Amino acid sequence: MRTMTLHTLLAPLFILLLGFPAFAMEEDDPMEGVRTALLEHQHKIDWDKTEQNVFIKVYSSERTIKPGEKIPLIIEQIIRPHWHTYWKNPGDSGEPMHADWALPDGFKMSELEWPTPKPLPFEILVSYGYEGDVMLYQELQAPDTLAEGPIDIPVRFDILVCKEICIPETSTQTITLNAETTTSDLNVVPLDFITEARSFMPIKKDINPWQSKMYEQDDMLVLDILTDNHEAGLKQHTLHFFPYEYGLVEAAAEPEITLENNRIIYKQQRGKFELERIKNKGGVFVLIDKRTGQRFGSEIDPELTSPAEASTETTTSPTEKKTLNQIEFESAEQLPTNIFSAILFAIIGGMILNLMPCVFPVLSMKALSISRISQKSKAEARKHGIAYTAGVILSMLAIAGLLIALKEGGSSIGWGFHLQDPVVILLLAYLFFLIGMNLSGYFEFGTRLMSIGQGQTTAGISGSFMTGILATTVATPCTAPFMATALAYALNQPTIIALSVFAALGFGLALPYLLISFVPALQKMMPHPGQWMVTFKEFLAFPMFATVIWLLWILTQETGMNGIATPLIGLLGLTFTIWLFRHAEHANGGKKAILMLLALSTISGSMIYSLYQIQMIEIVKDKPMPEFGADYSAEALDTALMTDNPVFVEMTAAWCVTCKVNHYRAIDIPETRKIMKDRNITYFVGDWTSHDGEITKYLNKFGRNGVPIYVYYGRPDPETGKRPAPKLLPQLLSPGIVAETLDK
Amino acid sequence: MIKQSLFALALLIAPISAHAATEIGQPAPDFVATDIHGEEIKLSDFKGKNVVLEWSNHQCPYVVKHYDSHNMQNAQKEAVDGGAVWLTIVSSAEGKQGYVSPEEAQKIVEDVGANATTRIMDVSGEIGKLYEAKTTPHMFVIDAEGNLAYEGAIDDNPSVSQDGVEGAQNYVLAALDSLNAGEEVNPAQTAPYGCSVKY
C-alpha cells in the first residue's frame, strides 16, 4: 500500500515531535441492555416462545473451590424487552431480587453487589432498577476444611419483574462445584467475563475520591458533592441520586441541580422519613451520558451537616483527581493517571517543542542573542533567561485559560477528537503550508513577526519577555497536530491541574534557554549567527511541507480519494492569493485596489469552497484491508478466543504516529510474521481512525482511552482449558518485545 | 451561552413539586367520592371514627398474596369490628391494570369476601395523588380527629410469597390498637411495598 509506505517515511520525524500517545475524550455506548462482546454469549432467548419474563443464570470463572477459598459468582438477569426488575432500593414501588442459597455447613455467601441502577419513571412514580441484562455479583467462601467430592448448592431466586403489571417469578437452580463431570446450573466463563460484569458496578466509596455532605433545607435534601469531574463533562450527563433507603428523598421529585466547576449541588424533595430514622444515608450517585445512556455510578456516604456549616466551608478540590474517562478506568480496576507524571511529561513535551520547525528559527535566534549578551554580563544573561521563561509560562497560561473558558462556554469537547474532523485537518494543512511558504521566503509576512524577537533582544529584559510570548504564540499552532490530544486530556482535568500541566509545558519549552543563560559552558557552544541561518530557515520549510503531505494523507484516510482534490484547490487558492498580494504591494492606485480585491475574492472563494466541500464528502467507512491480519470485530475476537490458538490484537489509527511506527518497526516485519505463522496466532487489527464504538469499548476494557494498544491472549492451559490473563504490550514496541511475548 | 440560558430557563419553569400533602399528626386531606354501590363517600363524615385507607389492585401479586391468604379480609374484619371504617381505594386509570367497572368491582368484592366498609374506584387517580399513594397495597390510618396516624406498608414482610403472611407484624392493626388504647402509634411511617399504583 503506497500510502502506508509514505507514512513510514514521515513517521520517524513526527514521533520525535509527538511525545504523547493519542488520547480520546469520548467513551462509547454500551447502551442499555446491549452488552459488550465479552458478555454476549450463548443465551439467546426467543421471547415469543416463553411465558417467563426473566431468566436467571449463575456464572463463575471457577468450577472448583478449595478449603478457605473465595470464588466469584455472577448472577445474571436476562429481562424480557421493555420489562424491568428492581435495584436493592426499588424506589417508589417494586421489590429487589432475593437469592436464597441453601449453603452447606461452613460456607459463606457475601452480600449481593448491584450494578449501577437507572430511574424507571411510571406516571407519577419513579422506581429504581434495570432493563435488558443485569449482572449481580456475589462471592462464595468455602470453610477451612472441606470433604472430597462434589458440592451441590441449591439456590432459589425470587424476583419481581414488571412492565405495567408486575409478575413474581421464581427460579430454582443447583450449582455444583468440585465435580468431575457435571450437569450443574453453574456456567463456567473466563475471568474476563467476571471482571467485565463487575465494571458495571458503582465505584466503591472507599476508592471514590468524591467528597460529599448533605443537609436539609426547606423540605429539600441537599447533596453537596465535590467531584473529580470537570463541569463541561458533568454537563454531558444527567445526574441522579439513588439512596440506599426508602424515605430519604421523594424518588419522583425532579431534582434541582447546580454545577460550579467540579462541584454538584443536588437538591431533591425530602422523603417521608425523619433523617434520624434512616440508618444508611448514603447511596449511589449516577452520571448518565446524555448521548449514549451509559451510566457511571459512584457510591457516596455524605457527611450530615447543616446549611449554615455547609455555606461557611470553602470549596476545596479533592486531592486526587480523575476524569470521567478515568472513572471507567477505575471500574475496570486500573490505576488512575498520576498528576506528577503528567507534569513531568509536559516538561519533556515542552522541551521537545523546541525542535518544532516553526519554533526553532525564533528560538535559535533567541539563544544566540542570549549568548551574545552573556559575553558582556552573566547576570544580565540570567535576567534575560528568567524574563523569557516568565513570558513563555504566562502566555501558555493565558492560552490555557482561553481554552478552558471556551470549553466551559460550549458543552462539546470536540478538541480531543480534532484529528477525526476533516475540517480541522484541512485548516491545519493550510496553516502548515503557509508557514512553509513563509520559511522558504516566498512571502515575508512572518519574518517581520519573527524579527520582533530578534530586534528587541537589545531592548532589555522586557524584550526577552516579549520573545517568550512570541515563542509561545508561534509554537502553539504548530504544536496542534502533535500535542493537542494530550493537551485536551489535560484540559479535561479540573482547572487547577490543567493549568499546572500547561505551565509545566511552558517551563519545558523555556528550559533549554534558561539553561543556556545560566550555564556559561553551554553559551560557548552556540554557533555564531550568519548567512547560514537564512539557509537553515529555508531548509526548515521542507518539514512543513512534509507535514502538509501527512495531514492530507490523514484526510484521504477519512474521506477517500475524493477528499484529495478539495484541499489541493484550497492550496492553489492560497498560493494565488499570496502571489496577488505580493504584486499588490508594489502596485499603486486603481491597480492595487483591483489586485487586492482579486486577492480577497480568491482567498474567500477557495476557503469557503474547500471547507464546505470537505464536509460534504461522506466519510469512507470501509477501510482497506490491513496488509496482513484480519479486521477487528468484537465478534471475530470472541470466535477466535473460543479456539486454542493464541490471539494478538492491535488497535491503531491513521493519525496515530506511534501506532504506525510500532506497526512497521515491530509487527509488519518478517520475523514477527514468521512467529505468527509458526505459532498459528490469530492476528486482528482494529482501525480507530474515524470513531469506532466497538474499538472504544475494547480500549476501555483495558483502562485505555486511546490508541495504540497491543494485547496478547496466550494459548489456553491444556488441563483447565482456560486462557492466561491477556497480556498488554507496551505502547512503544520493539521487535524484541513482540518476539518475546508472542514466542512464549 | 444559549445552552446555559435555556438550562436556567428550564429550571425556572420546571414544575415545583408540591409539598407532601400527607404528614403524620396533621389533618388528612378530605375527599368526596362515589363508591362502587353509587353511594357518596366523604372522608370528613367519618370524624369520630378511625379510618383505614387501603390502596388496592386485584391483579397485583402483592394484593393477591394478602387476599388469597385471607390476611387482608381478616384485618378488615378486625378493624371494622373494632369500630373503624375501612375504605379500599383502586386508583387504576381506565385501561390500566386493576381498572374495572363498578359492577365488576362488586363481583370482585364478593368473590374475595372482602370485609371492608366499601370500595372506591378512583379512576382519575385524584385521591391516590392527594395521598401520594405509591404501591398496592399502600395503607393509611386516620384517627378519630381526622389526623393521619399511620402511613406505609401493611406489614413488615415486603414479599409476594404467601409463606410470609403468618408471623408478619401488621402495622395497620397495631396502629388501630394503639389509637384505641390512646397510645402513640409506633411505627407511624414505614416504606410501602408492592406494585406501583397504575395511575
Image (cartoon, grey):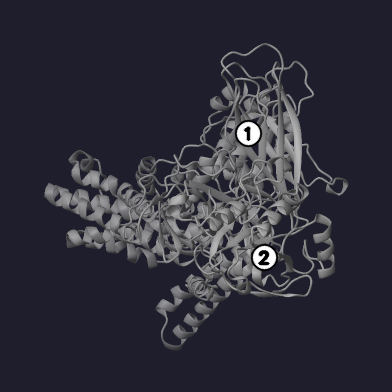
Whole-percent x, y for residue A18 in the image: 46, 45
Chain under numbered label 1: A
**Quadrant that contains the N terminus of chain A:** top right
Give above or below for A146 relative to A173.
above
Q: Is residue B94 left or right of residue A574?
A: right
Whole-percent x, y for residue A158 in the image: 71, 40
Query: Amino acid under label 2?
Result: Glu
Give above or below for A313 relative to A301.
below
Q: Nearer the viewer, residue A126 or A338?
A: A126
Q: Nearer the viewer, residue B48 or A80?
A: B48
Marks 2, 1: nearer the viewer: 2
Whole-percent x, y for residue B188 in the image: 53, 55
Q: Which residue is mark 1?
A: A194
Whether labels 2 and 1 share one chain = yes
**Quadrant that contains the C terminus of chain A:** top right
Q: Choose the circle earlier in sequence order: 2 or 1.
A: 2
Whole-percent x, y for residue A651 in the image: 61, 40
Q: Which mark is residue A24?
A: none
- Residue with the most extreme bottom position: A590
Describe the element under mark 2 as helix, strand or loop. loop
Q: Which residue is mark 2?
A: A123
Mark 1, other Cα within 10 Å: few <14 / some 14–19 / many ≥20: many
Give above or below for A180 relative to A258.
above
Q: Is residue A79 left or right of residue A118?
A: right
Real-space Cα distance between discs 2 and 1? 36 Å
**Can residue A668 be seen from the camera position used here?**
no
